[in-house]
Image: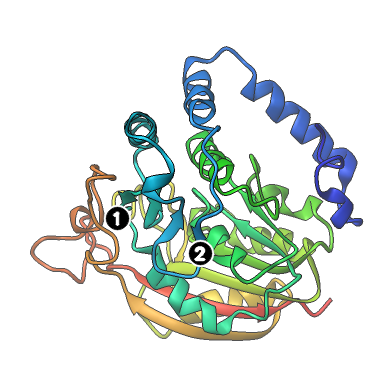
Amino acid sequence: MNFSANYLHLLPKANIAALDLLHSQNETRLSSQKKGILRLRELAESVSHLQTQHLNLDDKVVTIGNADEINKTEQDKLYQVLRSFMPWRKGPFSLFGIDIDAEWQSDRKWDRLLPFLPDLKDKVIADIGCNNGYYMFRMAHHEPKLVVGFEPYLHHYFTFRTLNSFAGLDILQMELLGVEEAGLFSQSFDVVLLLGILYHRISPLECLREVRKSMVHGGTLIVESQAIPGEEPVALFPTERYAKVPGTYFVPTASCLHNWISRAGFTDVEIFCSHAMTSEEQRRTDWMEFESYRDFIDPRNPELTIEGYPAPLRVFVKAINPG
Protein backbone atom coordinates (compact mmCIF):
# COMPACT_ATOMS: atom_id res chain seq x y z
CA MET A 1 0.00 0.00 0.00
CA ASN A 2 1.38 3.39 -0.91
CA PHE A 3 1.00 6.56 1.10
CA SER A 4 -1.75 8.04 -1.03
CA ALA A 5 -3.90 4.90 -0.70
CA ASN A 6 -3.62 5.17 3.07
CA TYR A 7 -4.28 8.68 4.39
CA LEU A 8 -2.59 11.28 2.23
CA HIS A 9 -5.95 12.11 0.65
CA LEU A 10 -6.34 14.16 3.84
CA LEU A 11 -3.19 16.10 2.96
CA PRO A 12 -3.72 17.33 -0.61
CA LYS A 13 -0.68 19.61 -0.77
CA ALA A 14 1.81 16.95 0.33
CA ASN A 15 4.41 15.72 -2.14
CA ILE A 16 2.72 12.37 -2.67
CA ALA A 17 5.14 11.14 -5.33
CA ALA A 18 8.16 11.66 -3.07
CA LEU A 19 6.39 10.14 -0.07
CA ASP A 20 5.32 7.11 -2.10
CA LEU A 21 8.95 6.61 -3.10
CA LEU A 22 10.05 6.80 0.53
CA HIS A 23 7.28 4.40 1.50
CA SER A 24 8.39 1.94 -1.15
CA GLN A 25 11.99 2.16 0.06
CA ASN A 26 10.89 1.56 3.64
CA GLU A 27 8.78 -1.43 2.64
CA THR A 28 11.84 -2.90 0.92
CA ARG A 29 13.84 -2.25 4.08
CA LEU A 30 11.20 -3.92 6.25
CA SER A 31 10.90 -6.96 3.99
CA SER A 32 14.66 -7.56 3.90
CA GLN A 33 16.13 -10.63 5.53
CA LYS A 34 17.94 -8.80 8.29
CA LYS A 35 17.58 -10.84 11.44
CA GLY A 36 16.77 -7.91 13.72
CA ILE A 37 14.01 -6.56 11.49
CA LEU A 38 12.46 -9.99 11.04
CA ARG A 39 12.49 -10.54 14.78
CA LEU A 40 10.71 -7.22 15.46
CA ARG A 41 8.10 -7.94 12.80
CA GLU A 42 7.52 -11.47 14.14
CA LEU A 43 7.06 -10.17 17.67
CA ALA A 44 4.51 -7.59 16.52
CA GLU A 45 2.59 -10.13 14.45
CA SER A 46 2.59 -12.80 17.16
CA VAL A 47 0.17 -10.79 19.32
CA SER A 48 -1.64 -8.78 16.64
CA HIS A 49 -4.80 -10.87 17.09
CA LEU A 50 -5.35 -9.27 20.51
CA GLN A 51 -7.83 -6.42 20.19
CA THR A 52 -9.88 -4.40 22.63
CA GLN A 53 -12.53 -1.73 22.95
CA HIS A 54 -11.37 -0.92 26.48
CA LEU A 55 -9.26 2.22 26.17
CA ASN A 56 -8.40 4.98 28.62
CA LEU A 57 -6.31 7.62 26.89
CA ASP A 58 -7.08 10.47 29.26
CA ASP A 59 -5.09 9.39 32.28
CA LYS A 60 -1.46 9.28 33.35
CA VAL A 61 -1.34 5.63 32.30
CA VAL A 62 -2.34 4.89 28.70
CA THR A 63 -4.57 1.85 29.20
CA ILE A 64 -5.23 -0.49 26.30
CA GLY A 65 -7.23 -3.59 27.20
CA ASN A 66 -8.21 -5.19 30.49
CA ALA A 67 -6.59 -8.23 32.08
CA ASP A 68 -9.82 -10.27 31.94
CA GLU A 69 -10.01 -10.01 28.14
CA ILE A 70 -7.22 -12.54 27.56
CA ASN A 71 -6.34 -15.87 29.13
CA LYS A 72 -3.23 -16.73 31.14
CA THR A 73 -1.40 -18.22 28.16
CA GLU A 74 -2.06 -15.13 26.04
CA GLN A 75 -0.99 -12.81 28.85
CA ASP A 76 2.26 -14.73 29.39
CA LYS A 77 2.98 -14.53 25.66
CA LEU A 78 2.19 -10.83 25.59
CA TYR A 79 4.43 -10.19 28.58
CA GLN A 80 7.38 -11.82 26.81
CA VAL A 81 6.74 -9.81 23.64
CA LEU A 82 6.56 -6.54 25.58
CA ARG A 83 9.78 -7.41 27.42
CA SER A 84 11.42 -7.97 24.05
CA PHE A 85 10.58 -4.38 23.09
CA MET A 86 12.72 -3.05 25.96
CA PRO A 87 13.96 -0.47 26.68
CA TRP A 88 10.66 1.38 27.12
CA ARG A 89 11.54 5.07 27.02
CA LYS A 90 8.06 6.70 27.06
CA GLY A 91 5.09 5.79 29.22
CA PRO A 92 3.50 4.61 31.44
CA PHE A 93 1.23 2.03 29.79
CA SER A 94 -1.10 -0.69 30.97
CA LEU A 95 -1.63 -3.36 28.31
CA PHE A 96 -4.21 -6.06 29.07
CA GLY A 97 -3.28 -5.79 32.74
CA ILE A 98 0.50 -5.65 32.22
CA ASP A 99 1.87 -2.44 33.73
CA ILE A 100 4.87 -0.83 32.02
CA ASP A 101 6.79 1.77 34.02
CA ALA A 102 8.86 3.48 31.33
CA GLU A 103 12.09 5.45 31.81
CA TRP A 104 10.29 8.77 31.39
CA GLN A 105 7.16 9.63 33.33
CA SER A 106 5.86 11.17 30.14
CA ASP A 107 2.57 12.22 31.70
CA ARG A 108 4.44 15.03 33.46
CA LYS A 109 5.55 16.50 30.14
CA TRP A 110 2.05 16.05 28.72
CA ASP A 111 0.55 17.92 31.69
CA ARG A 112 2.93 20.83 31.06
CA LEU A 113 2.12 21.23 27.38
CA LEU A 114 -1.60 20.37 27.33
CA PRO A 115 -2.84 23.78 28.57
CA PHE A 116 -0.98 25.47 25.71
CA LEU A 117 -2.25 23.24 22.91
CA PRO A 118 -5.05 24.52 20.70
CA ASP A 119 -8.30 22.57 20.48
CA LEU A 120 -7.22 19.30 18.81
CA LYS A 121 -10.65 18.18 17.64
CA ASP A 122 -10.64 17.50 13.87
CA LYS A 123 -7.06 18.76 13.59
CA VAL A 124 -4.26 17.16 11.54
CA ILE A 125 -1.24 16.75 13.81
CA ALA A 126 2.39 15.66 13.48
CA ASP A 127 4.36 14.20 16.38
CA ILE A 128 7.94 14.32 15.14
CA GLY A 129 10.24 11.92 16.95
CA CYS A 130 7.23 10.19 18.48
CA ASN A 131 9.05 7.16 19.97
CA ASN A 132 6.46 4.51 20.91
CA GLY A 133 3.52 6.89 20.43
CA TYR A 134 2.65 7.75 24.04
CA TYR A 135 1.74 11.34 23.16
CA MET A 136 -0.13 10.19 20.06
CA PHE A 137 -2.40 8.06 22.23
CA ARG A 138 -2.91 10.95 24.64
CA MET A 139 -3.87 13.22 21.72
CA ALA A 140 -6.30 10.62 20.36
CA HIS A 141 -8.58 11.28 23.34
CA HIS A 142 -9.14 14.82 21.96
CA GLU A 143 -10.61 13.51 18.67
CA PRO A 144 -8.17 14.80 16.03
CA LYS A 145 -8.78 14.00 12.40
CA LEU A 146 -5.31 12.44 12.07
CA VAL A 147 -2.05 12.16 13.98
CA VAL A 148 1.04 11.23 11.99
CA GLY A 149 4.03 10.04 13.99
CA PHE A 150 7.51 10.48 12.51
CA GLU A 151 9.87 7.83 13.89
CA PRO A 152 12.96 6.55 12.04
CA TYR A 153 13.92 3.85 14.56
CA LEU A 154 12.55 0.37 13.91
CA HIS A 155 12.40 -0.56 17.58
CA HIS A 156 9.95 2.27 18.35
CA TYR A 157 8.07 1.79 15.07
CA PHE A 158 7.24 -1.84 15.80
CA THR A 159 6.42 -1.09 19.44
CA PHE A 160 3.81 1.44 18.30
CA ARG A 161 2.45 -0.90 15.63
CA THR A 162 1.94 -3.54 18.30
CA LEU A 163 0.18 -1.16 20.69
CA ASN A 164 -2.07 0.26 18.00
CA SER A 165 -2.95 -3.19 16.68
CA PHE A 166 -4.57 -3.69 20.11
CA ALA A 167 -6.24 -0.27 20.15
CA GLY A 168 -7.31 -0.17 16.48
CA LEU A 169 -7.11 3.62 16.18
CA ASP A 170 -7.09 4.46 12.46
CA ILE A 171 -6.58 8.16 13.24
CA LEU A 172 -3.08 7.29 14.48
CA GLN A 173 -0.48 6.55 11.81
CA MET A 174 3.28 6.17 12.14
CA GLU A 175 5.89 6.30 9.40
CA LEU A 176 9.59 5.43 9.32
CA LEU A 177 10.49 9.05 8.67
CA GLY A 178 12.62 11.67 10.38
CA VAL A 179 12.25 15.39 10.78
CA GLU A 180 14.22 15.89 7.57
CA GLU A 181 11.19 14.55 5.64
CA ALA A 182 8.72 16.95 7.29
CA GLY A 183 8.85 19.43 4.40
CA LEU A 184 7.40 16.82 2.03
CA PHE A 185 4.11 17.19 3.91
CA SER A 186 3.61 20.66 2.48
CA GLN A 187 1.06 22.83 4.36
CA SER A 188 -0.46 19.75 6.00
CA PHE A 189 -0.39 20.05 9.77
CA ASP A 190 -2.47 22.23 12.05
CA VAL A 191 -0.30 21.31 15.03
CA VAL A 192 3.27 20.01 15.22
CA LEU A 193 4.94 18.58 18.31
CA LEU A 194 8.74 18.72 18.16
CA LEU A 195 9.77 17.28 21.51
CA GLY A 196 13.36 16.44 22.34
CA ILE A 197 14.64 16.82 18.78
CA LEU A 198 16.47 20.10 18.14
CA TYR A 199 19.60 19.44 20.21
CA HIS A 200 20.16 16.26 18.17
CA ARG A 201 20.27 18.19 14.88
CA ILE A 202 23.45 19.55 13.32
CA SER A 203 21.46 22.48 11.95
CA PRO A 204 18.55 23.30 14.27
CA LEU A 205 17.50 26.33 12.22
CA GLU A 206 17.18 24.29 9.02
CA CYS A 207 15.25 21.69 11.00
CA LEU A 208 12.75 24.33 12.11
CA ARG A 209 12.40 25.64 8.56
CA GLU A 210 11.57 22.15 7.27
CA VAL A 211 8.97 21.78 9.99
CA ARG A 212 7.47 25.15 9.10
CA LYS A 213 7.01 24.00 5.48
CA SER A 214 4.80 21.19 6.76
CA MET A 215 2.42 23.49 8.63
CA VAL A 216 -0.75 25.25 7.55
CA HIS A 217 -0.95 29.03 7.87
CA GLY A 218 -1.81 29.80 11.47
CA GLY A 219 -0.67 26.36 12.63
CA THR A 220 0.73 25.84 16.13
CA LEU A 221 4.23 24.56 16.87
CA ILE A 222 5.17 23.16 20.28
CA VAL A 223 8.92 22.74 20.85
CA GLU A 224 10.51 21.11 23.88
CA SER A 225 14.27 21.00 24.19
CA GLN A 226 17.12 20.40 26.53
CA ALA A 227 18.67 23.71 27.48
CA ILE A 228 21.40 25.19 29.61
CA PRO A 229 20.90 27.91 32.23
CA GLY A 230 21.69 31.51 31.33
CA GLU A 231 20.22 34.75 30.03
CA GLU A 232 22.44 35.23 26.98
CA PRO A 233 21.27 33.89 23.57
CA VAL A 234 24.03 31.27 23.26
CA ALA A 235 24.28 27.51 22.80
CA LEU A 236 26.69 24.94 24.21
CA PHE A 237 28.50 22.81 21.61
CA PRO A 238 29.97 19.85 23.56
CA THR A 239 33.35 18.39 22.60
CA GLU A 240 32.03 14.85 22.16
CA ARG A 241 29.10 14.09 24.44
CA TYR A 242 26.60 15.92 26.59
CA ALA A 243 25.18 13.94 29.53
CA LYS A 244 26.81 10.87 27.93
CA VAL A 245 24.85 11.29 24.68
CA PRO A 246 27.13 11.47 21.61
CA GLY A 247 24.45 12.73 19.19
CA THR A 248 24.01 16.07 20.94
CA TYR A 249 25.14 19.18 19.06
CA PHE A 250 23.72 22.56 20.13
CA VAL A 251 22.19 22.88 23.63
CA PRO A 252 20.70 26.40 23.77
CA THR A 253 19.69 28.75 26.51
CA ALA A 254 15.97 29.54 26.55
CA SER A 255 16.57 32.90 24.83
CA CYS A 256 18.69 31.24 22.15
CA LEU A 257 15.93 28.69 21.50
CA HIS A 258 13.43 31.57 21.27
CA ASN A 259 15.65 33.27 18.68
CA TRP A 260 16.07 30.10 16.61
CA ILE A 261 12.29 29.72 16.36
CA SER A 262 11.76 33.40 15.53
CA ARG A 263 14.46 33.44 12.85
CA ALA A 264 12.99 30.30 11.29
CA GLY A 265 9.94 32.45 10.50
CA PHE A 266 7.56 31.70 13.36
CA THR A 267 5.68 34.42 15.23
CA ASP A 268 4.05 34.77 18.65
CA VAL A 269 6.95 32.83 20.15
CA GLU A 270 6.26 32.14 23.82
CA ILE A 271 8.40 30.31 26.37
CA PHE A 272 5.75 28.79 28.59
CA CYS A 273 7.71 26.42 30.82
CA SER A 274 11.28 25.85 32.00
CA HIS A 275 12.29 23.34 34.63
CA ALA A 276 15.31 21.38 35.80
CA MET A 277 15.52 17.74 34.90
CA THR A 278 15.41 15.23 37.75
CA SER A 279 15.98 11.55 38.38
CA GLU A 280 12.35 11.29 39.48
CA GLU A 281 11.07 12.05 36.00
CA GLN A 282 13.73 10.15 34.04
CA ARG A 283 15.10 7.03 35.73
CA ARG A 284 15.88 3.34 35.47
CA THR A 285 12.96 0.98 35.87
CA ASP A 286 12.25 -2.72 35.43
CA TRP A 287 11.34 -1.85 31.84
CA MET A 288 14.41 0.31 31.12
CA GLU A 289 17.44 -1.23 32.78
CA PHE A 290 20.18 0.86 31.18
CA GLU A 291 21.79 4.08 32.41
CA SER A 292 19.45 7.00 32.97
CA TYR A 293 19.52 10.54 34.28
CA ARG A 294 21.25 9.82 37.58
CA ASP A 295 24.16 8.29 35.66
CA PHE A 296 24.50 11.37 33.42
CA ILE A 297 25.08 13.85 36.26
CA ASP A 298 28.24 14.50 38.30
CA PRO A 299 27.63 12.64 41.59
CA ARG A 300 29.54 15.35 43.48
CA ASN A 301 27.69 18.29 41.92
CA PRO A 302 24.14 17.86 40.58
CA GLU A 303 24.40 21.17 38.72
CA LEU A 304 26.92 19.63 36.30
CA THR A 305 26.80 16.78 33.81
CA ILE A 306 29.31 13.95 34.11
CA GLU A 307 31.45 15.84 31.54
CA GLY A 308 31.42 19.04 33.61
CA TYR A 309 28.88 20.98 31.51
CA PRO A 310 25.87 22.77 33.05
CA ALA A 311 23.16 20.23 33.89
CA PRO A 312 20.18 20.39 31.52
CA LEU A 313 16.92 22.22 31.86
CA ARG A 314 13.86 21.39 29.76
CA VAL A 315 12.33 24.39 27.99
CA PHE A 316 8.91 24.51 26.27
CA VAL A 317 8.03 27.00 23.53
CA LYS A 318 4.82 27.68 21.62
CA ALA A 319 4.86 29.48 18.26
CA ILE A 320 2.64 30.16 15.26
CA ASN A 321 3.36 29.69 11.56
CA PRO A 322 2.16 32.98 10.07
CA GLY A 323 2.12 31.71 6.49
Q: Is residue 233 visible?
A: no
Report helix, strand or loop for mark 1. loop
Vertical relation: 139 (above or below) 22: below
Q: What amino acid type is highlighted by mark number 1?
A: Ala
What is the CA distance from the residue labelled 1 to the residue labelled 2?
A: 32 Å
Q: Quadrant of residue 275?
A: bottom left
Residue at the spot x=47%, y=67% of the render?
Answer: 225
Determine which residue is flagged by label 2.
57
Of mark 1 and mark 2, the one earlier in the sequence is 2
158 w.r.t. 146: above or below: above
Inspect the image, locate mark 2, and give the three-letter code of the amino acid beneath it.
Leu
- Its colouring scheme is rainbow
- Mark 2 neighbour class, 10 Å CA radius: few under 14, some 14 to 19, many 20 or more: many
Residue tagged by mark 1?
243
Residue 291 x %, y %: 23, 46
Q: Quadrant of the N terminus?
A: top right
Q: Say which residue appears at 65% left-offset and 73% top-offset.
A: 221
Q: Is residue 156 left or right of residue 75?
A: right
Q: Is residue 147 visible?
A: yes
User: Percent position (x, y) of residue 318?
Assistant: 60, 80
In the rendered structure, are the residues bearing label 1 and label 2 in contact, judged by CB atoms less than 8 Å apart?
A: no
Q: Is residue 18 left or right of residue 182?
A: right
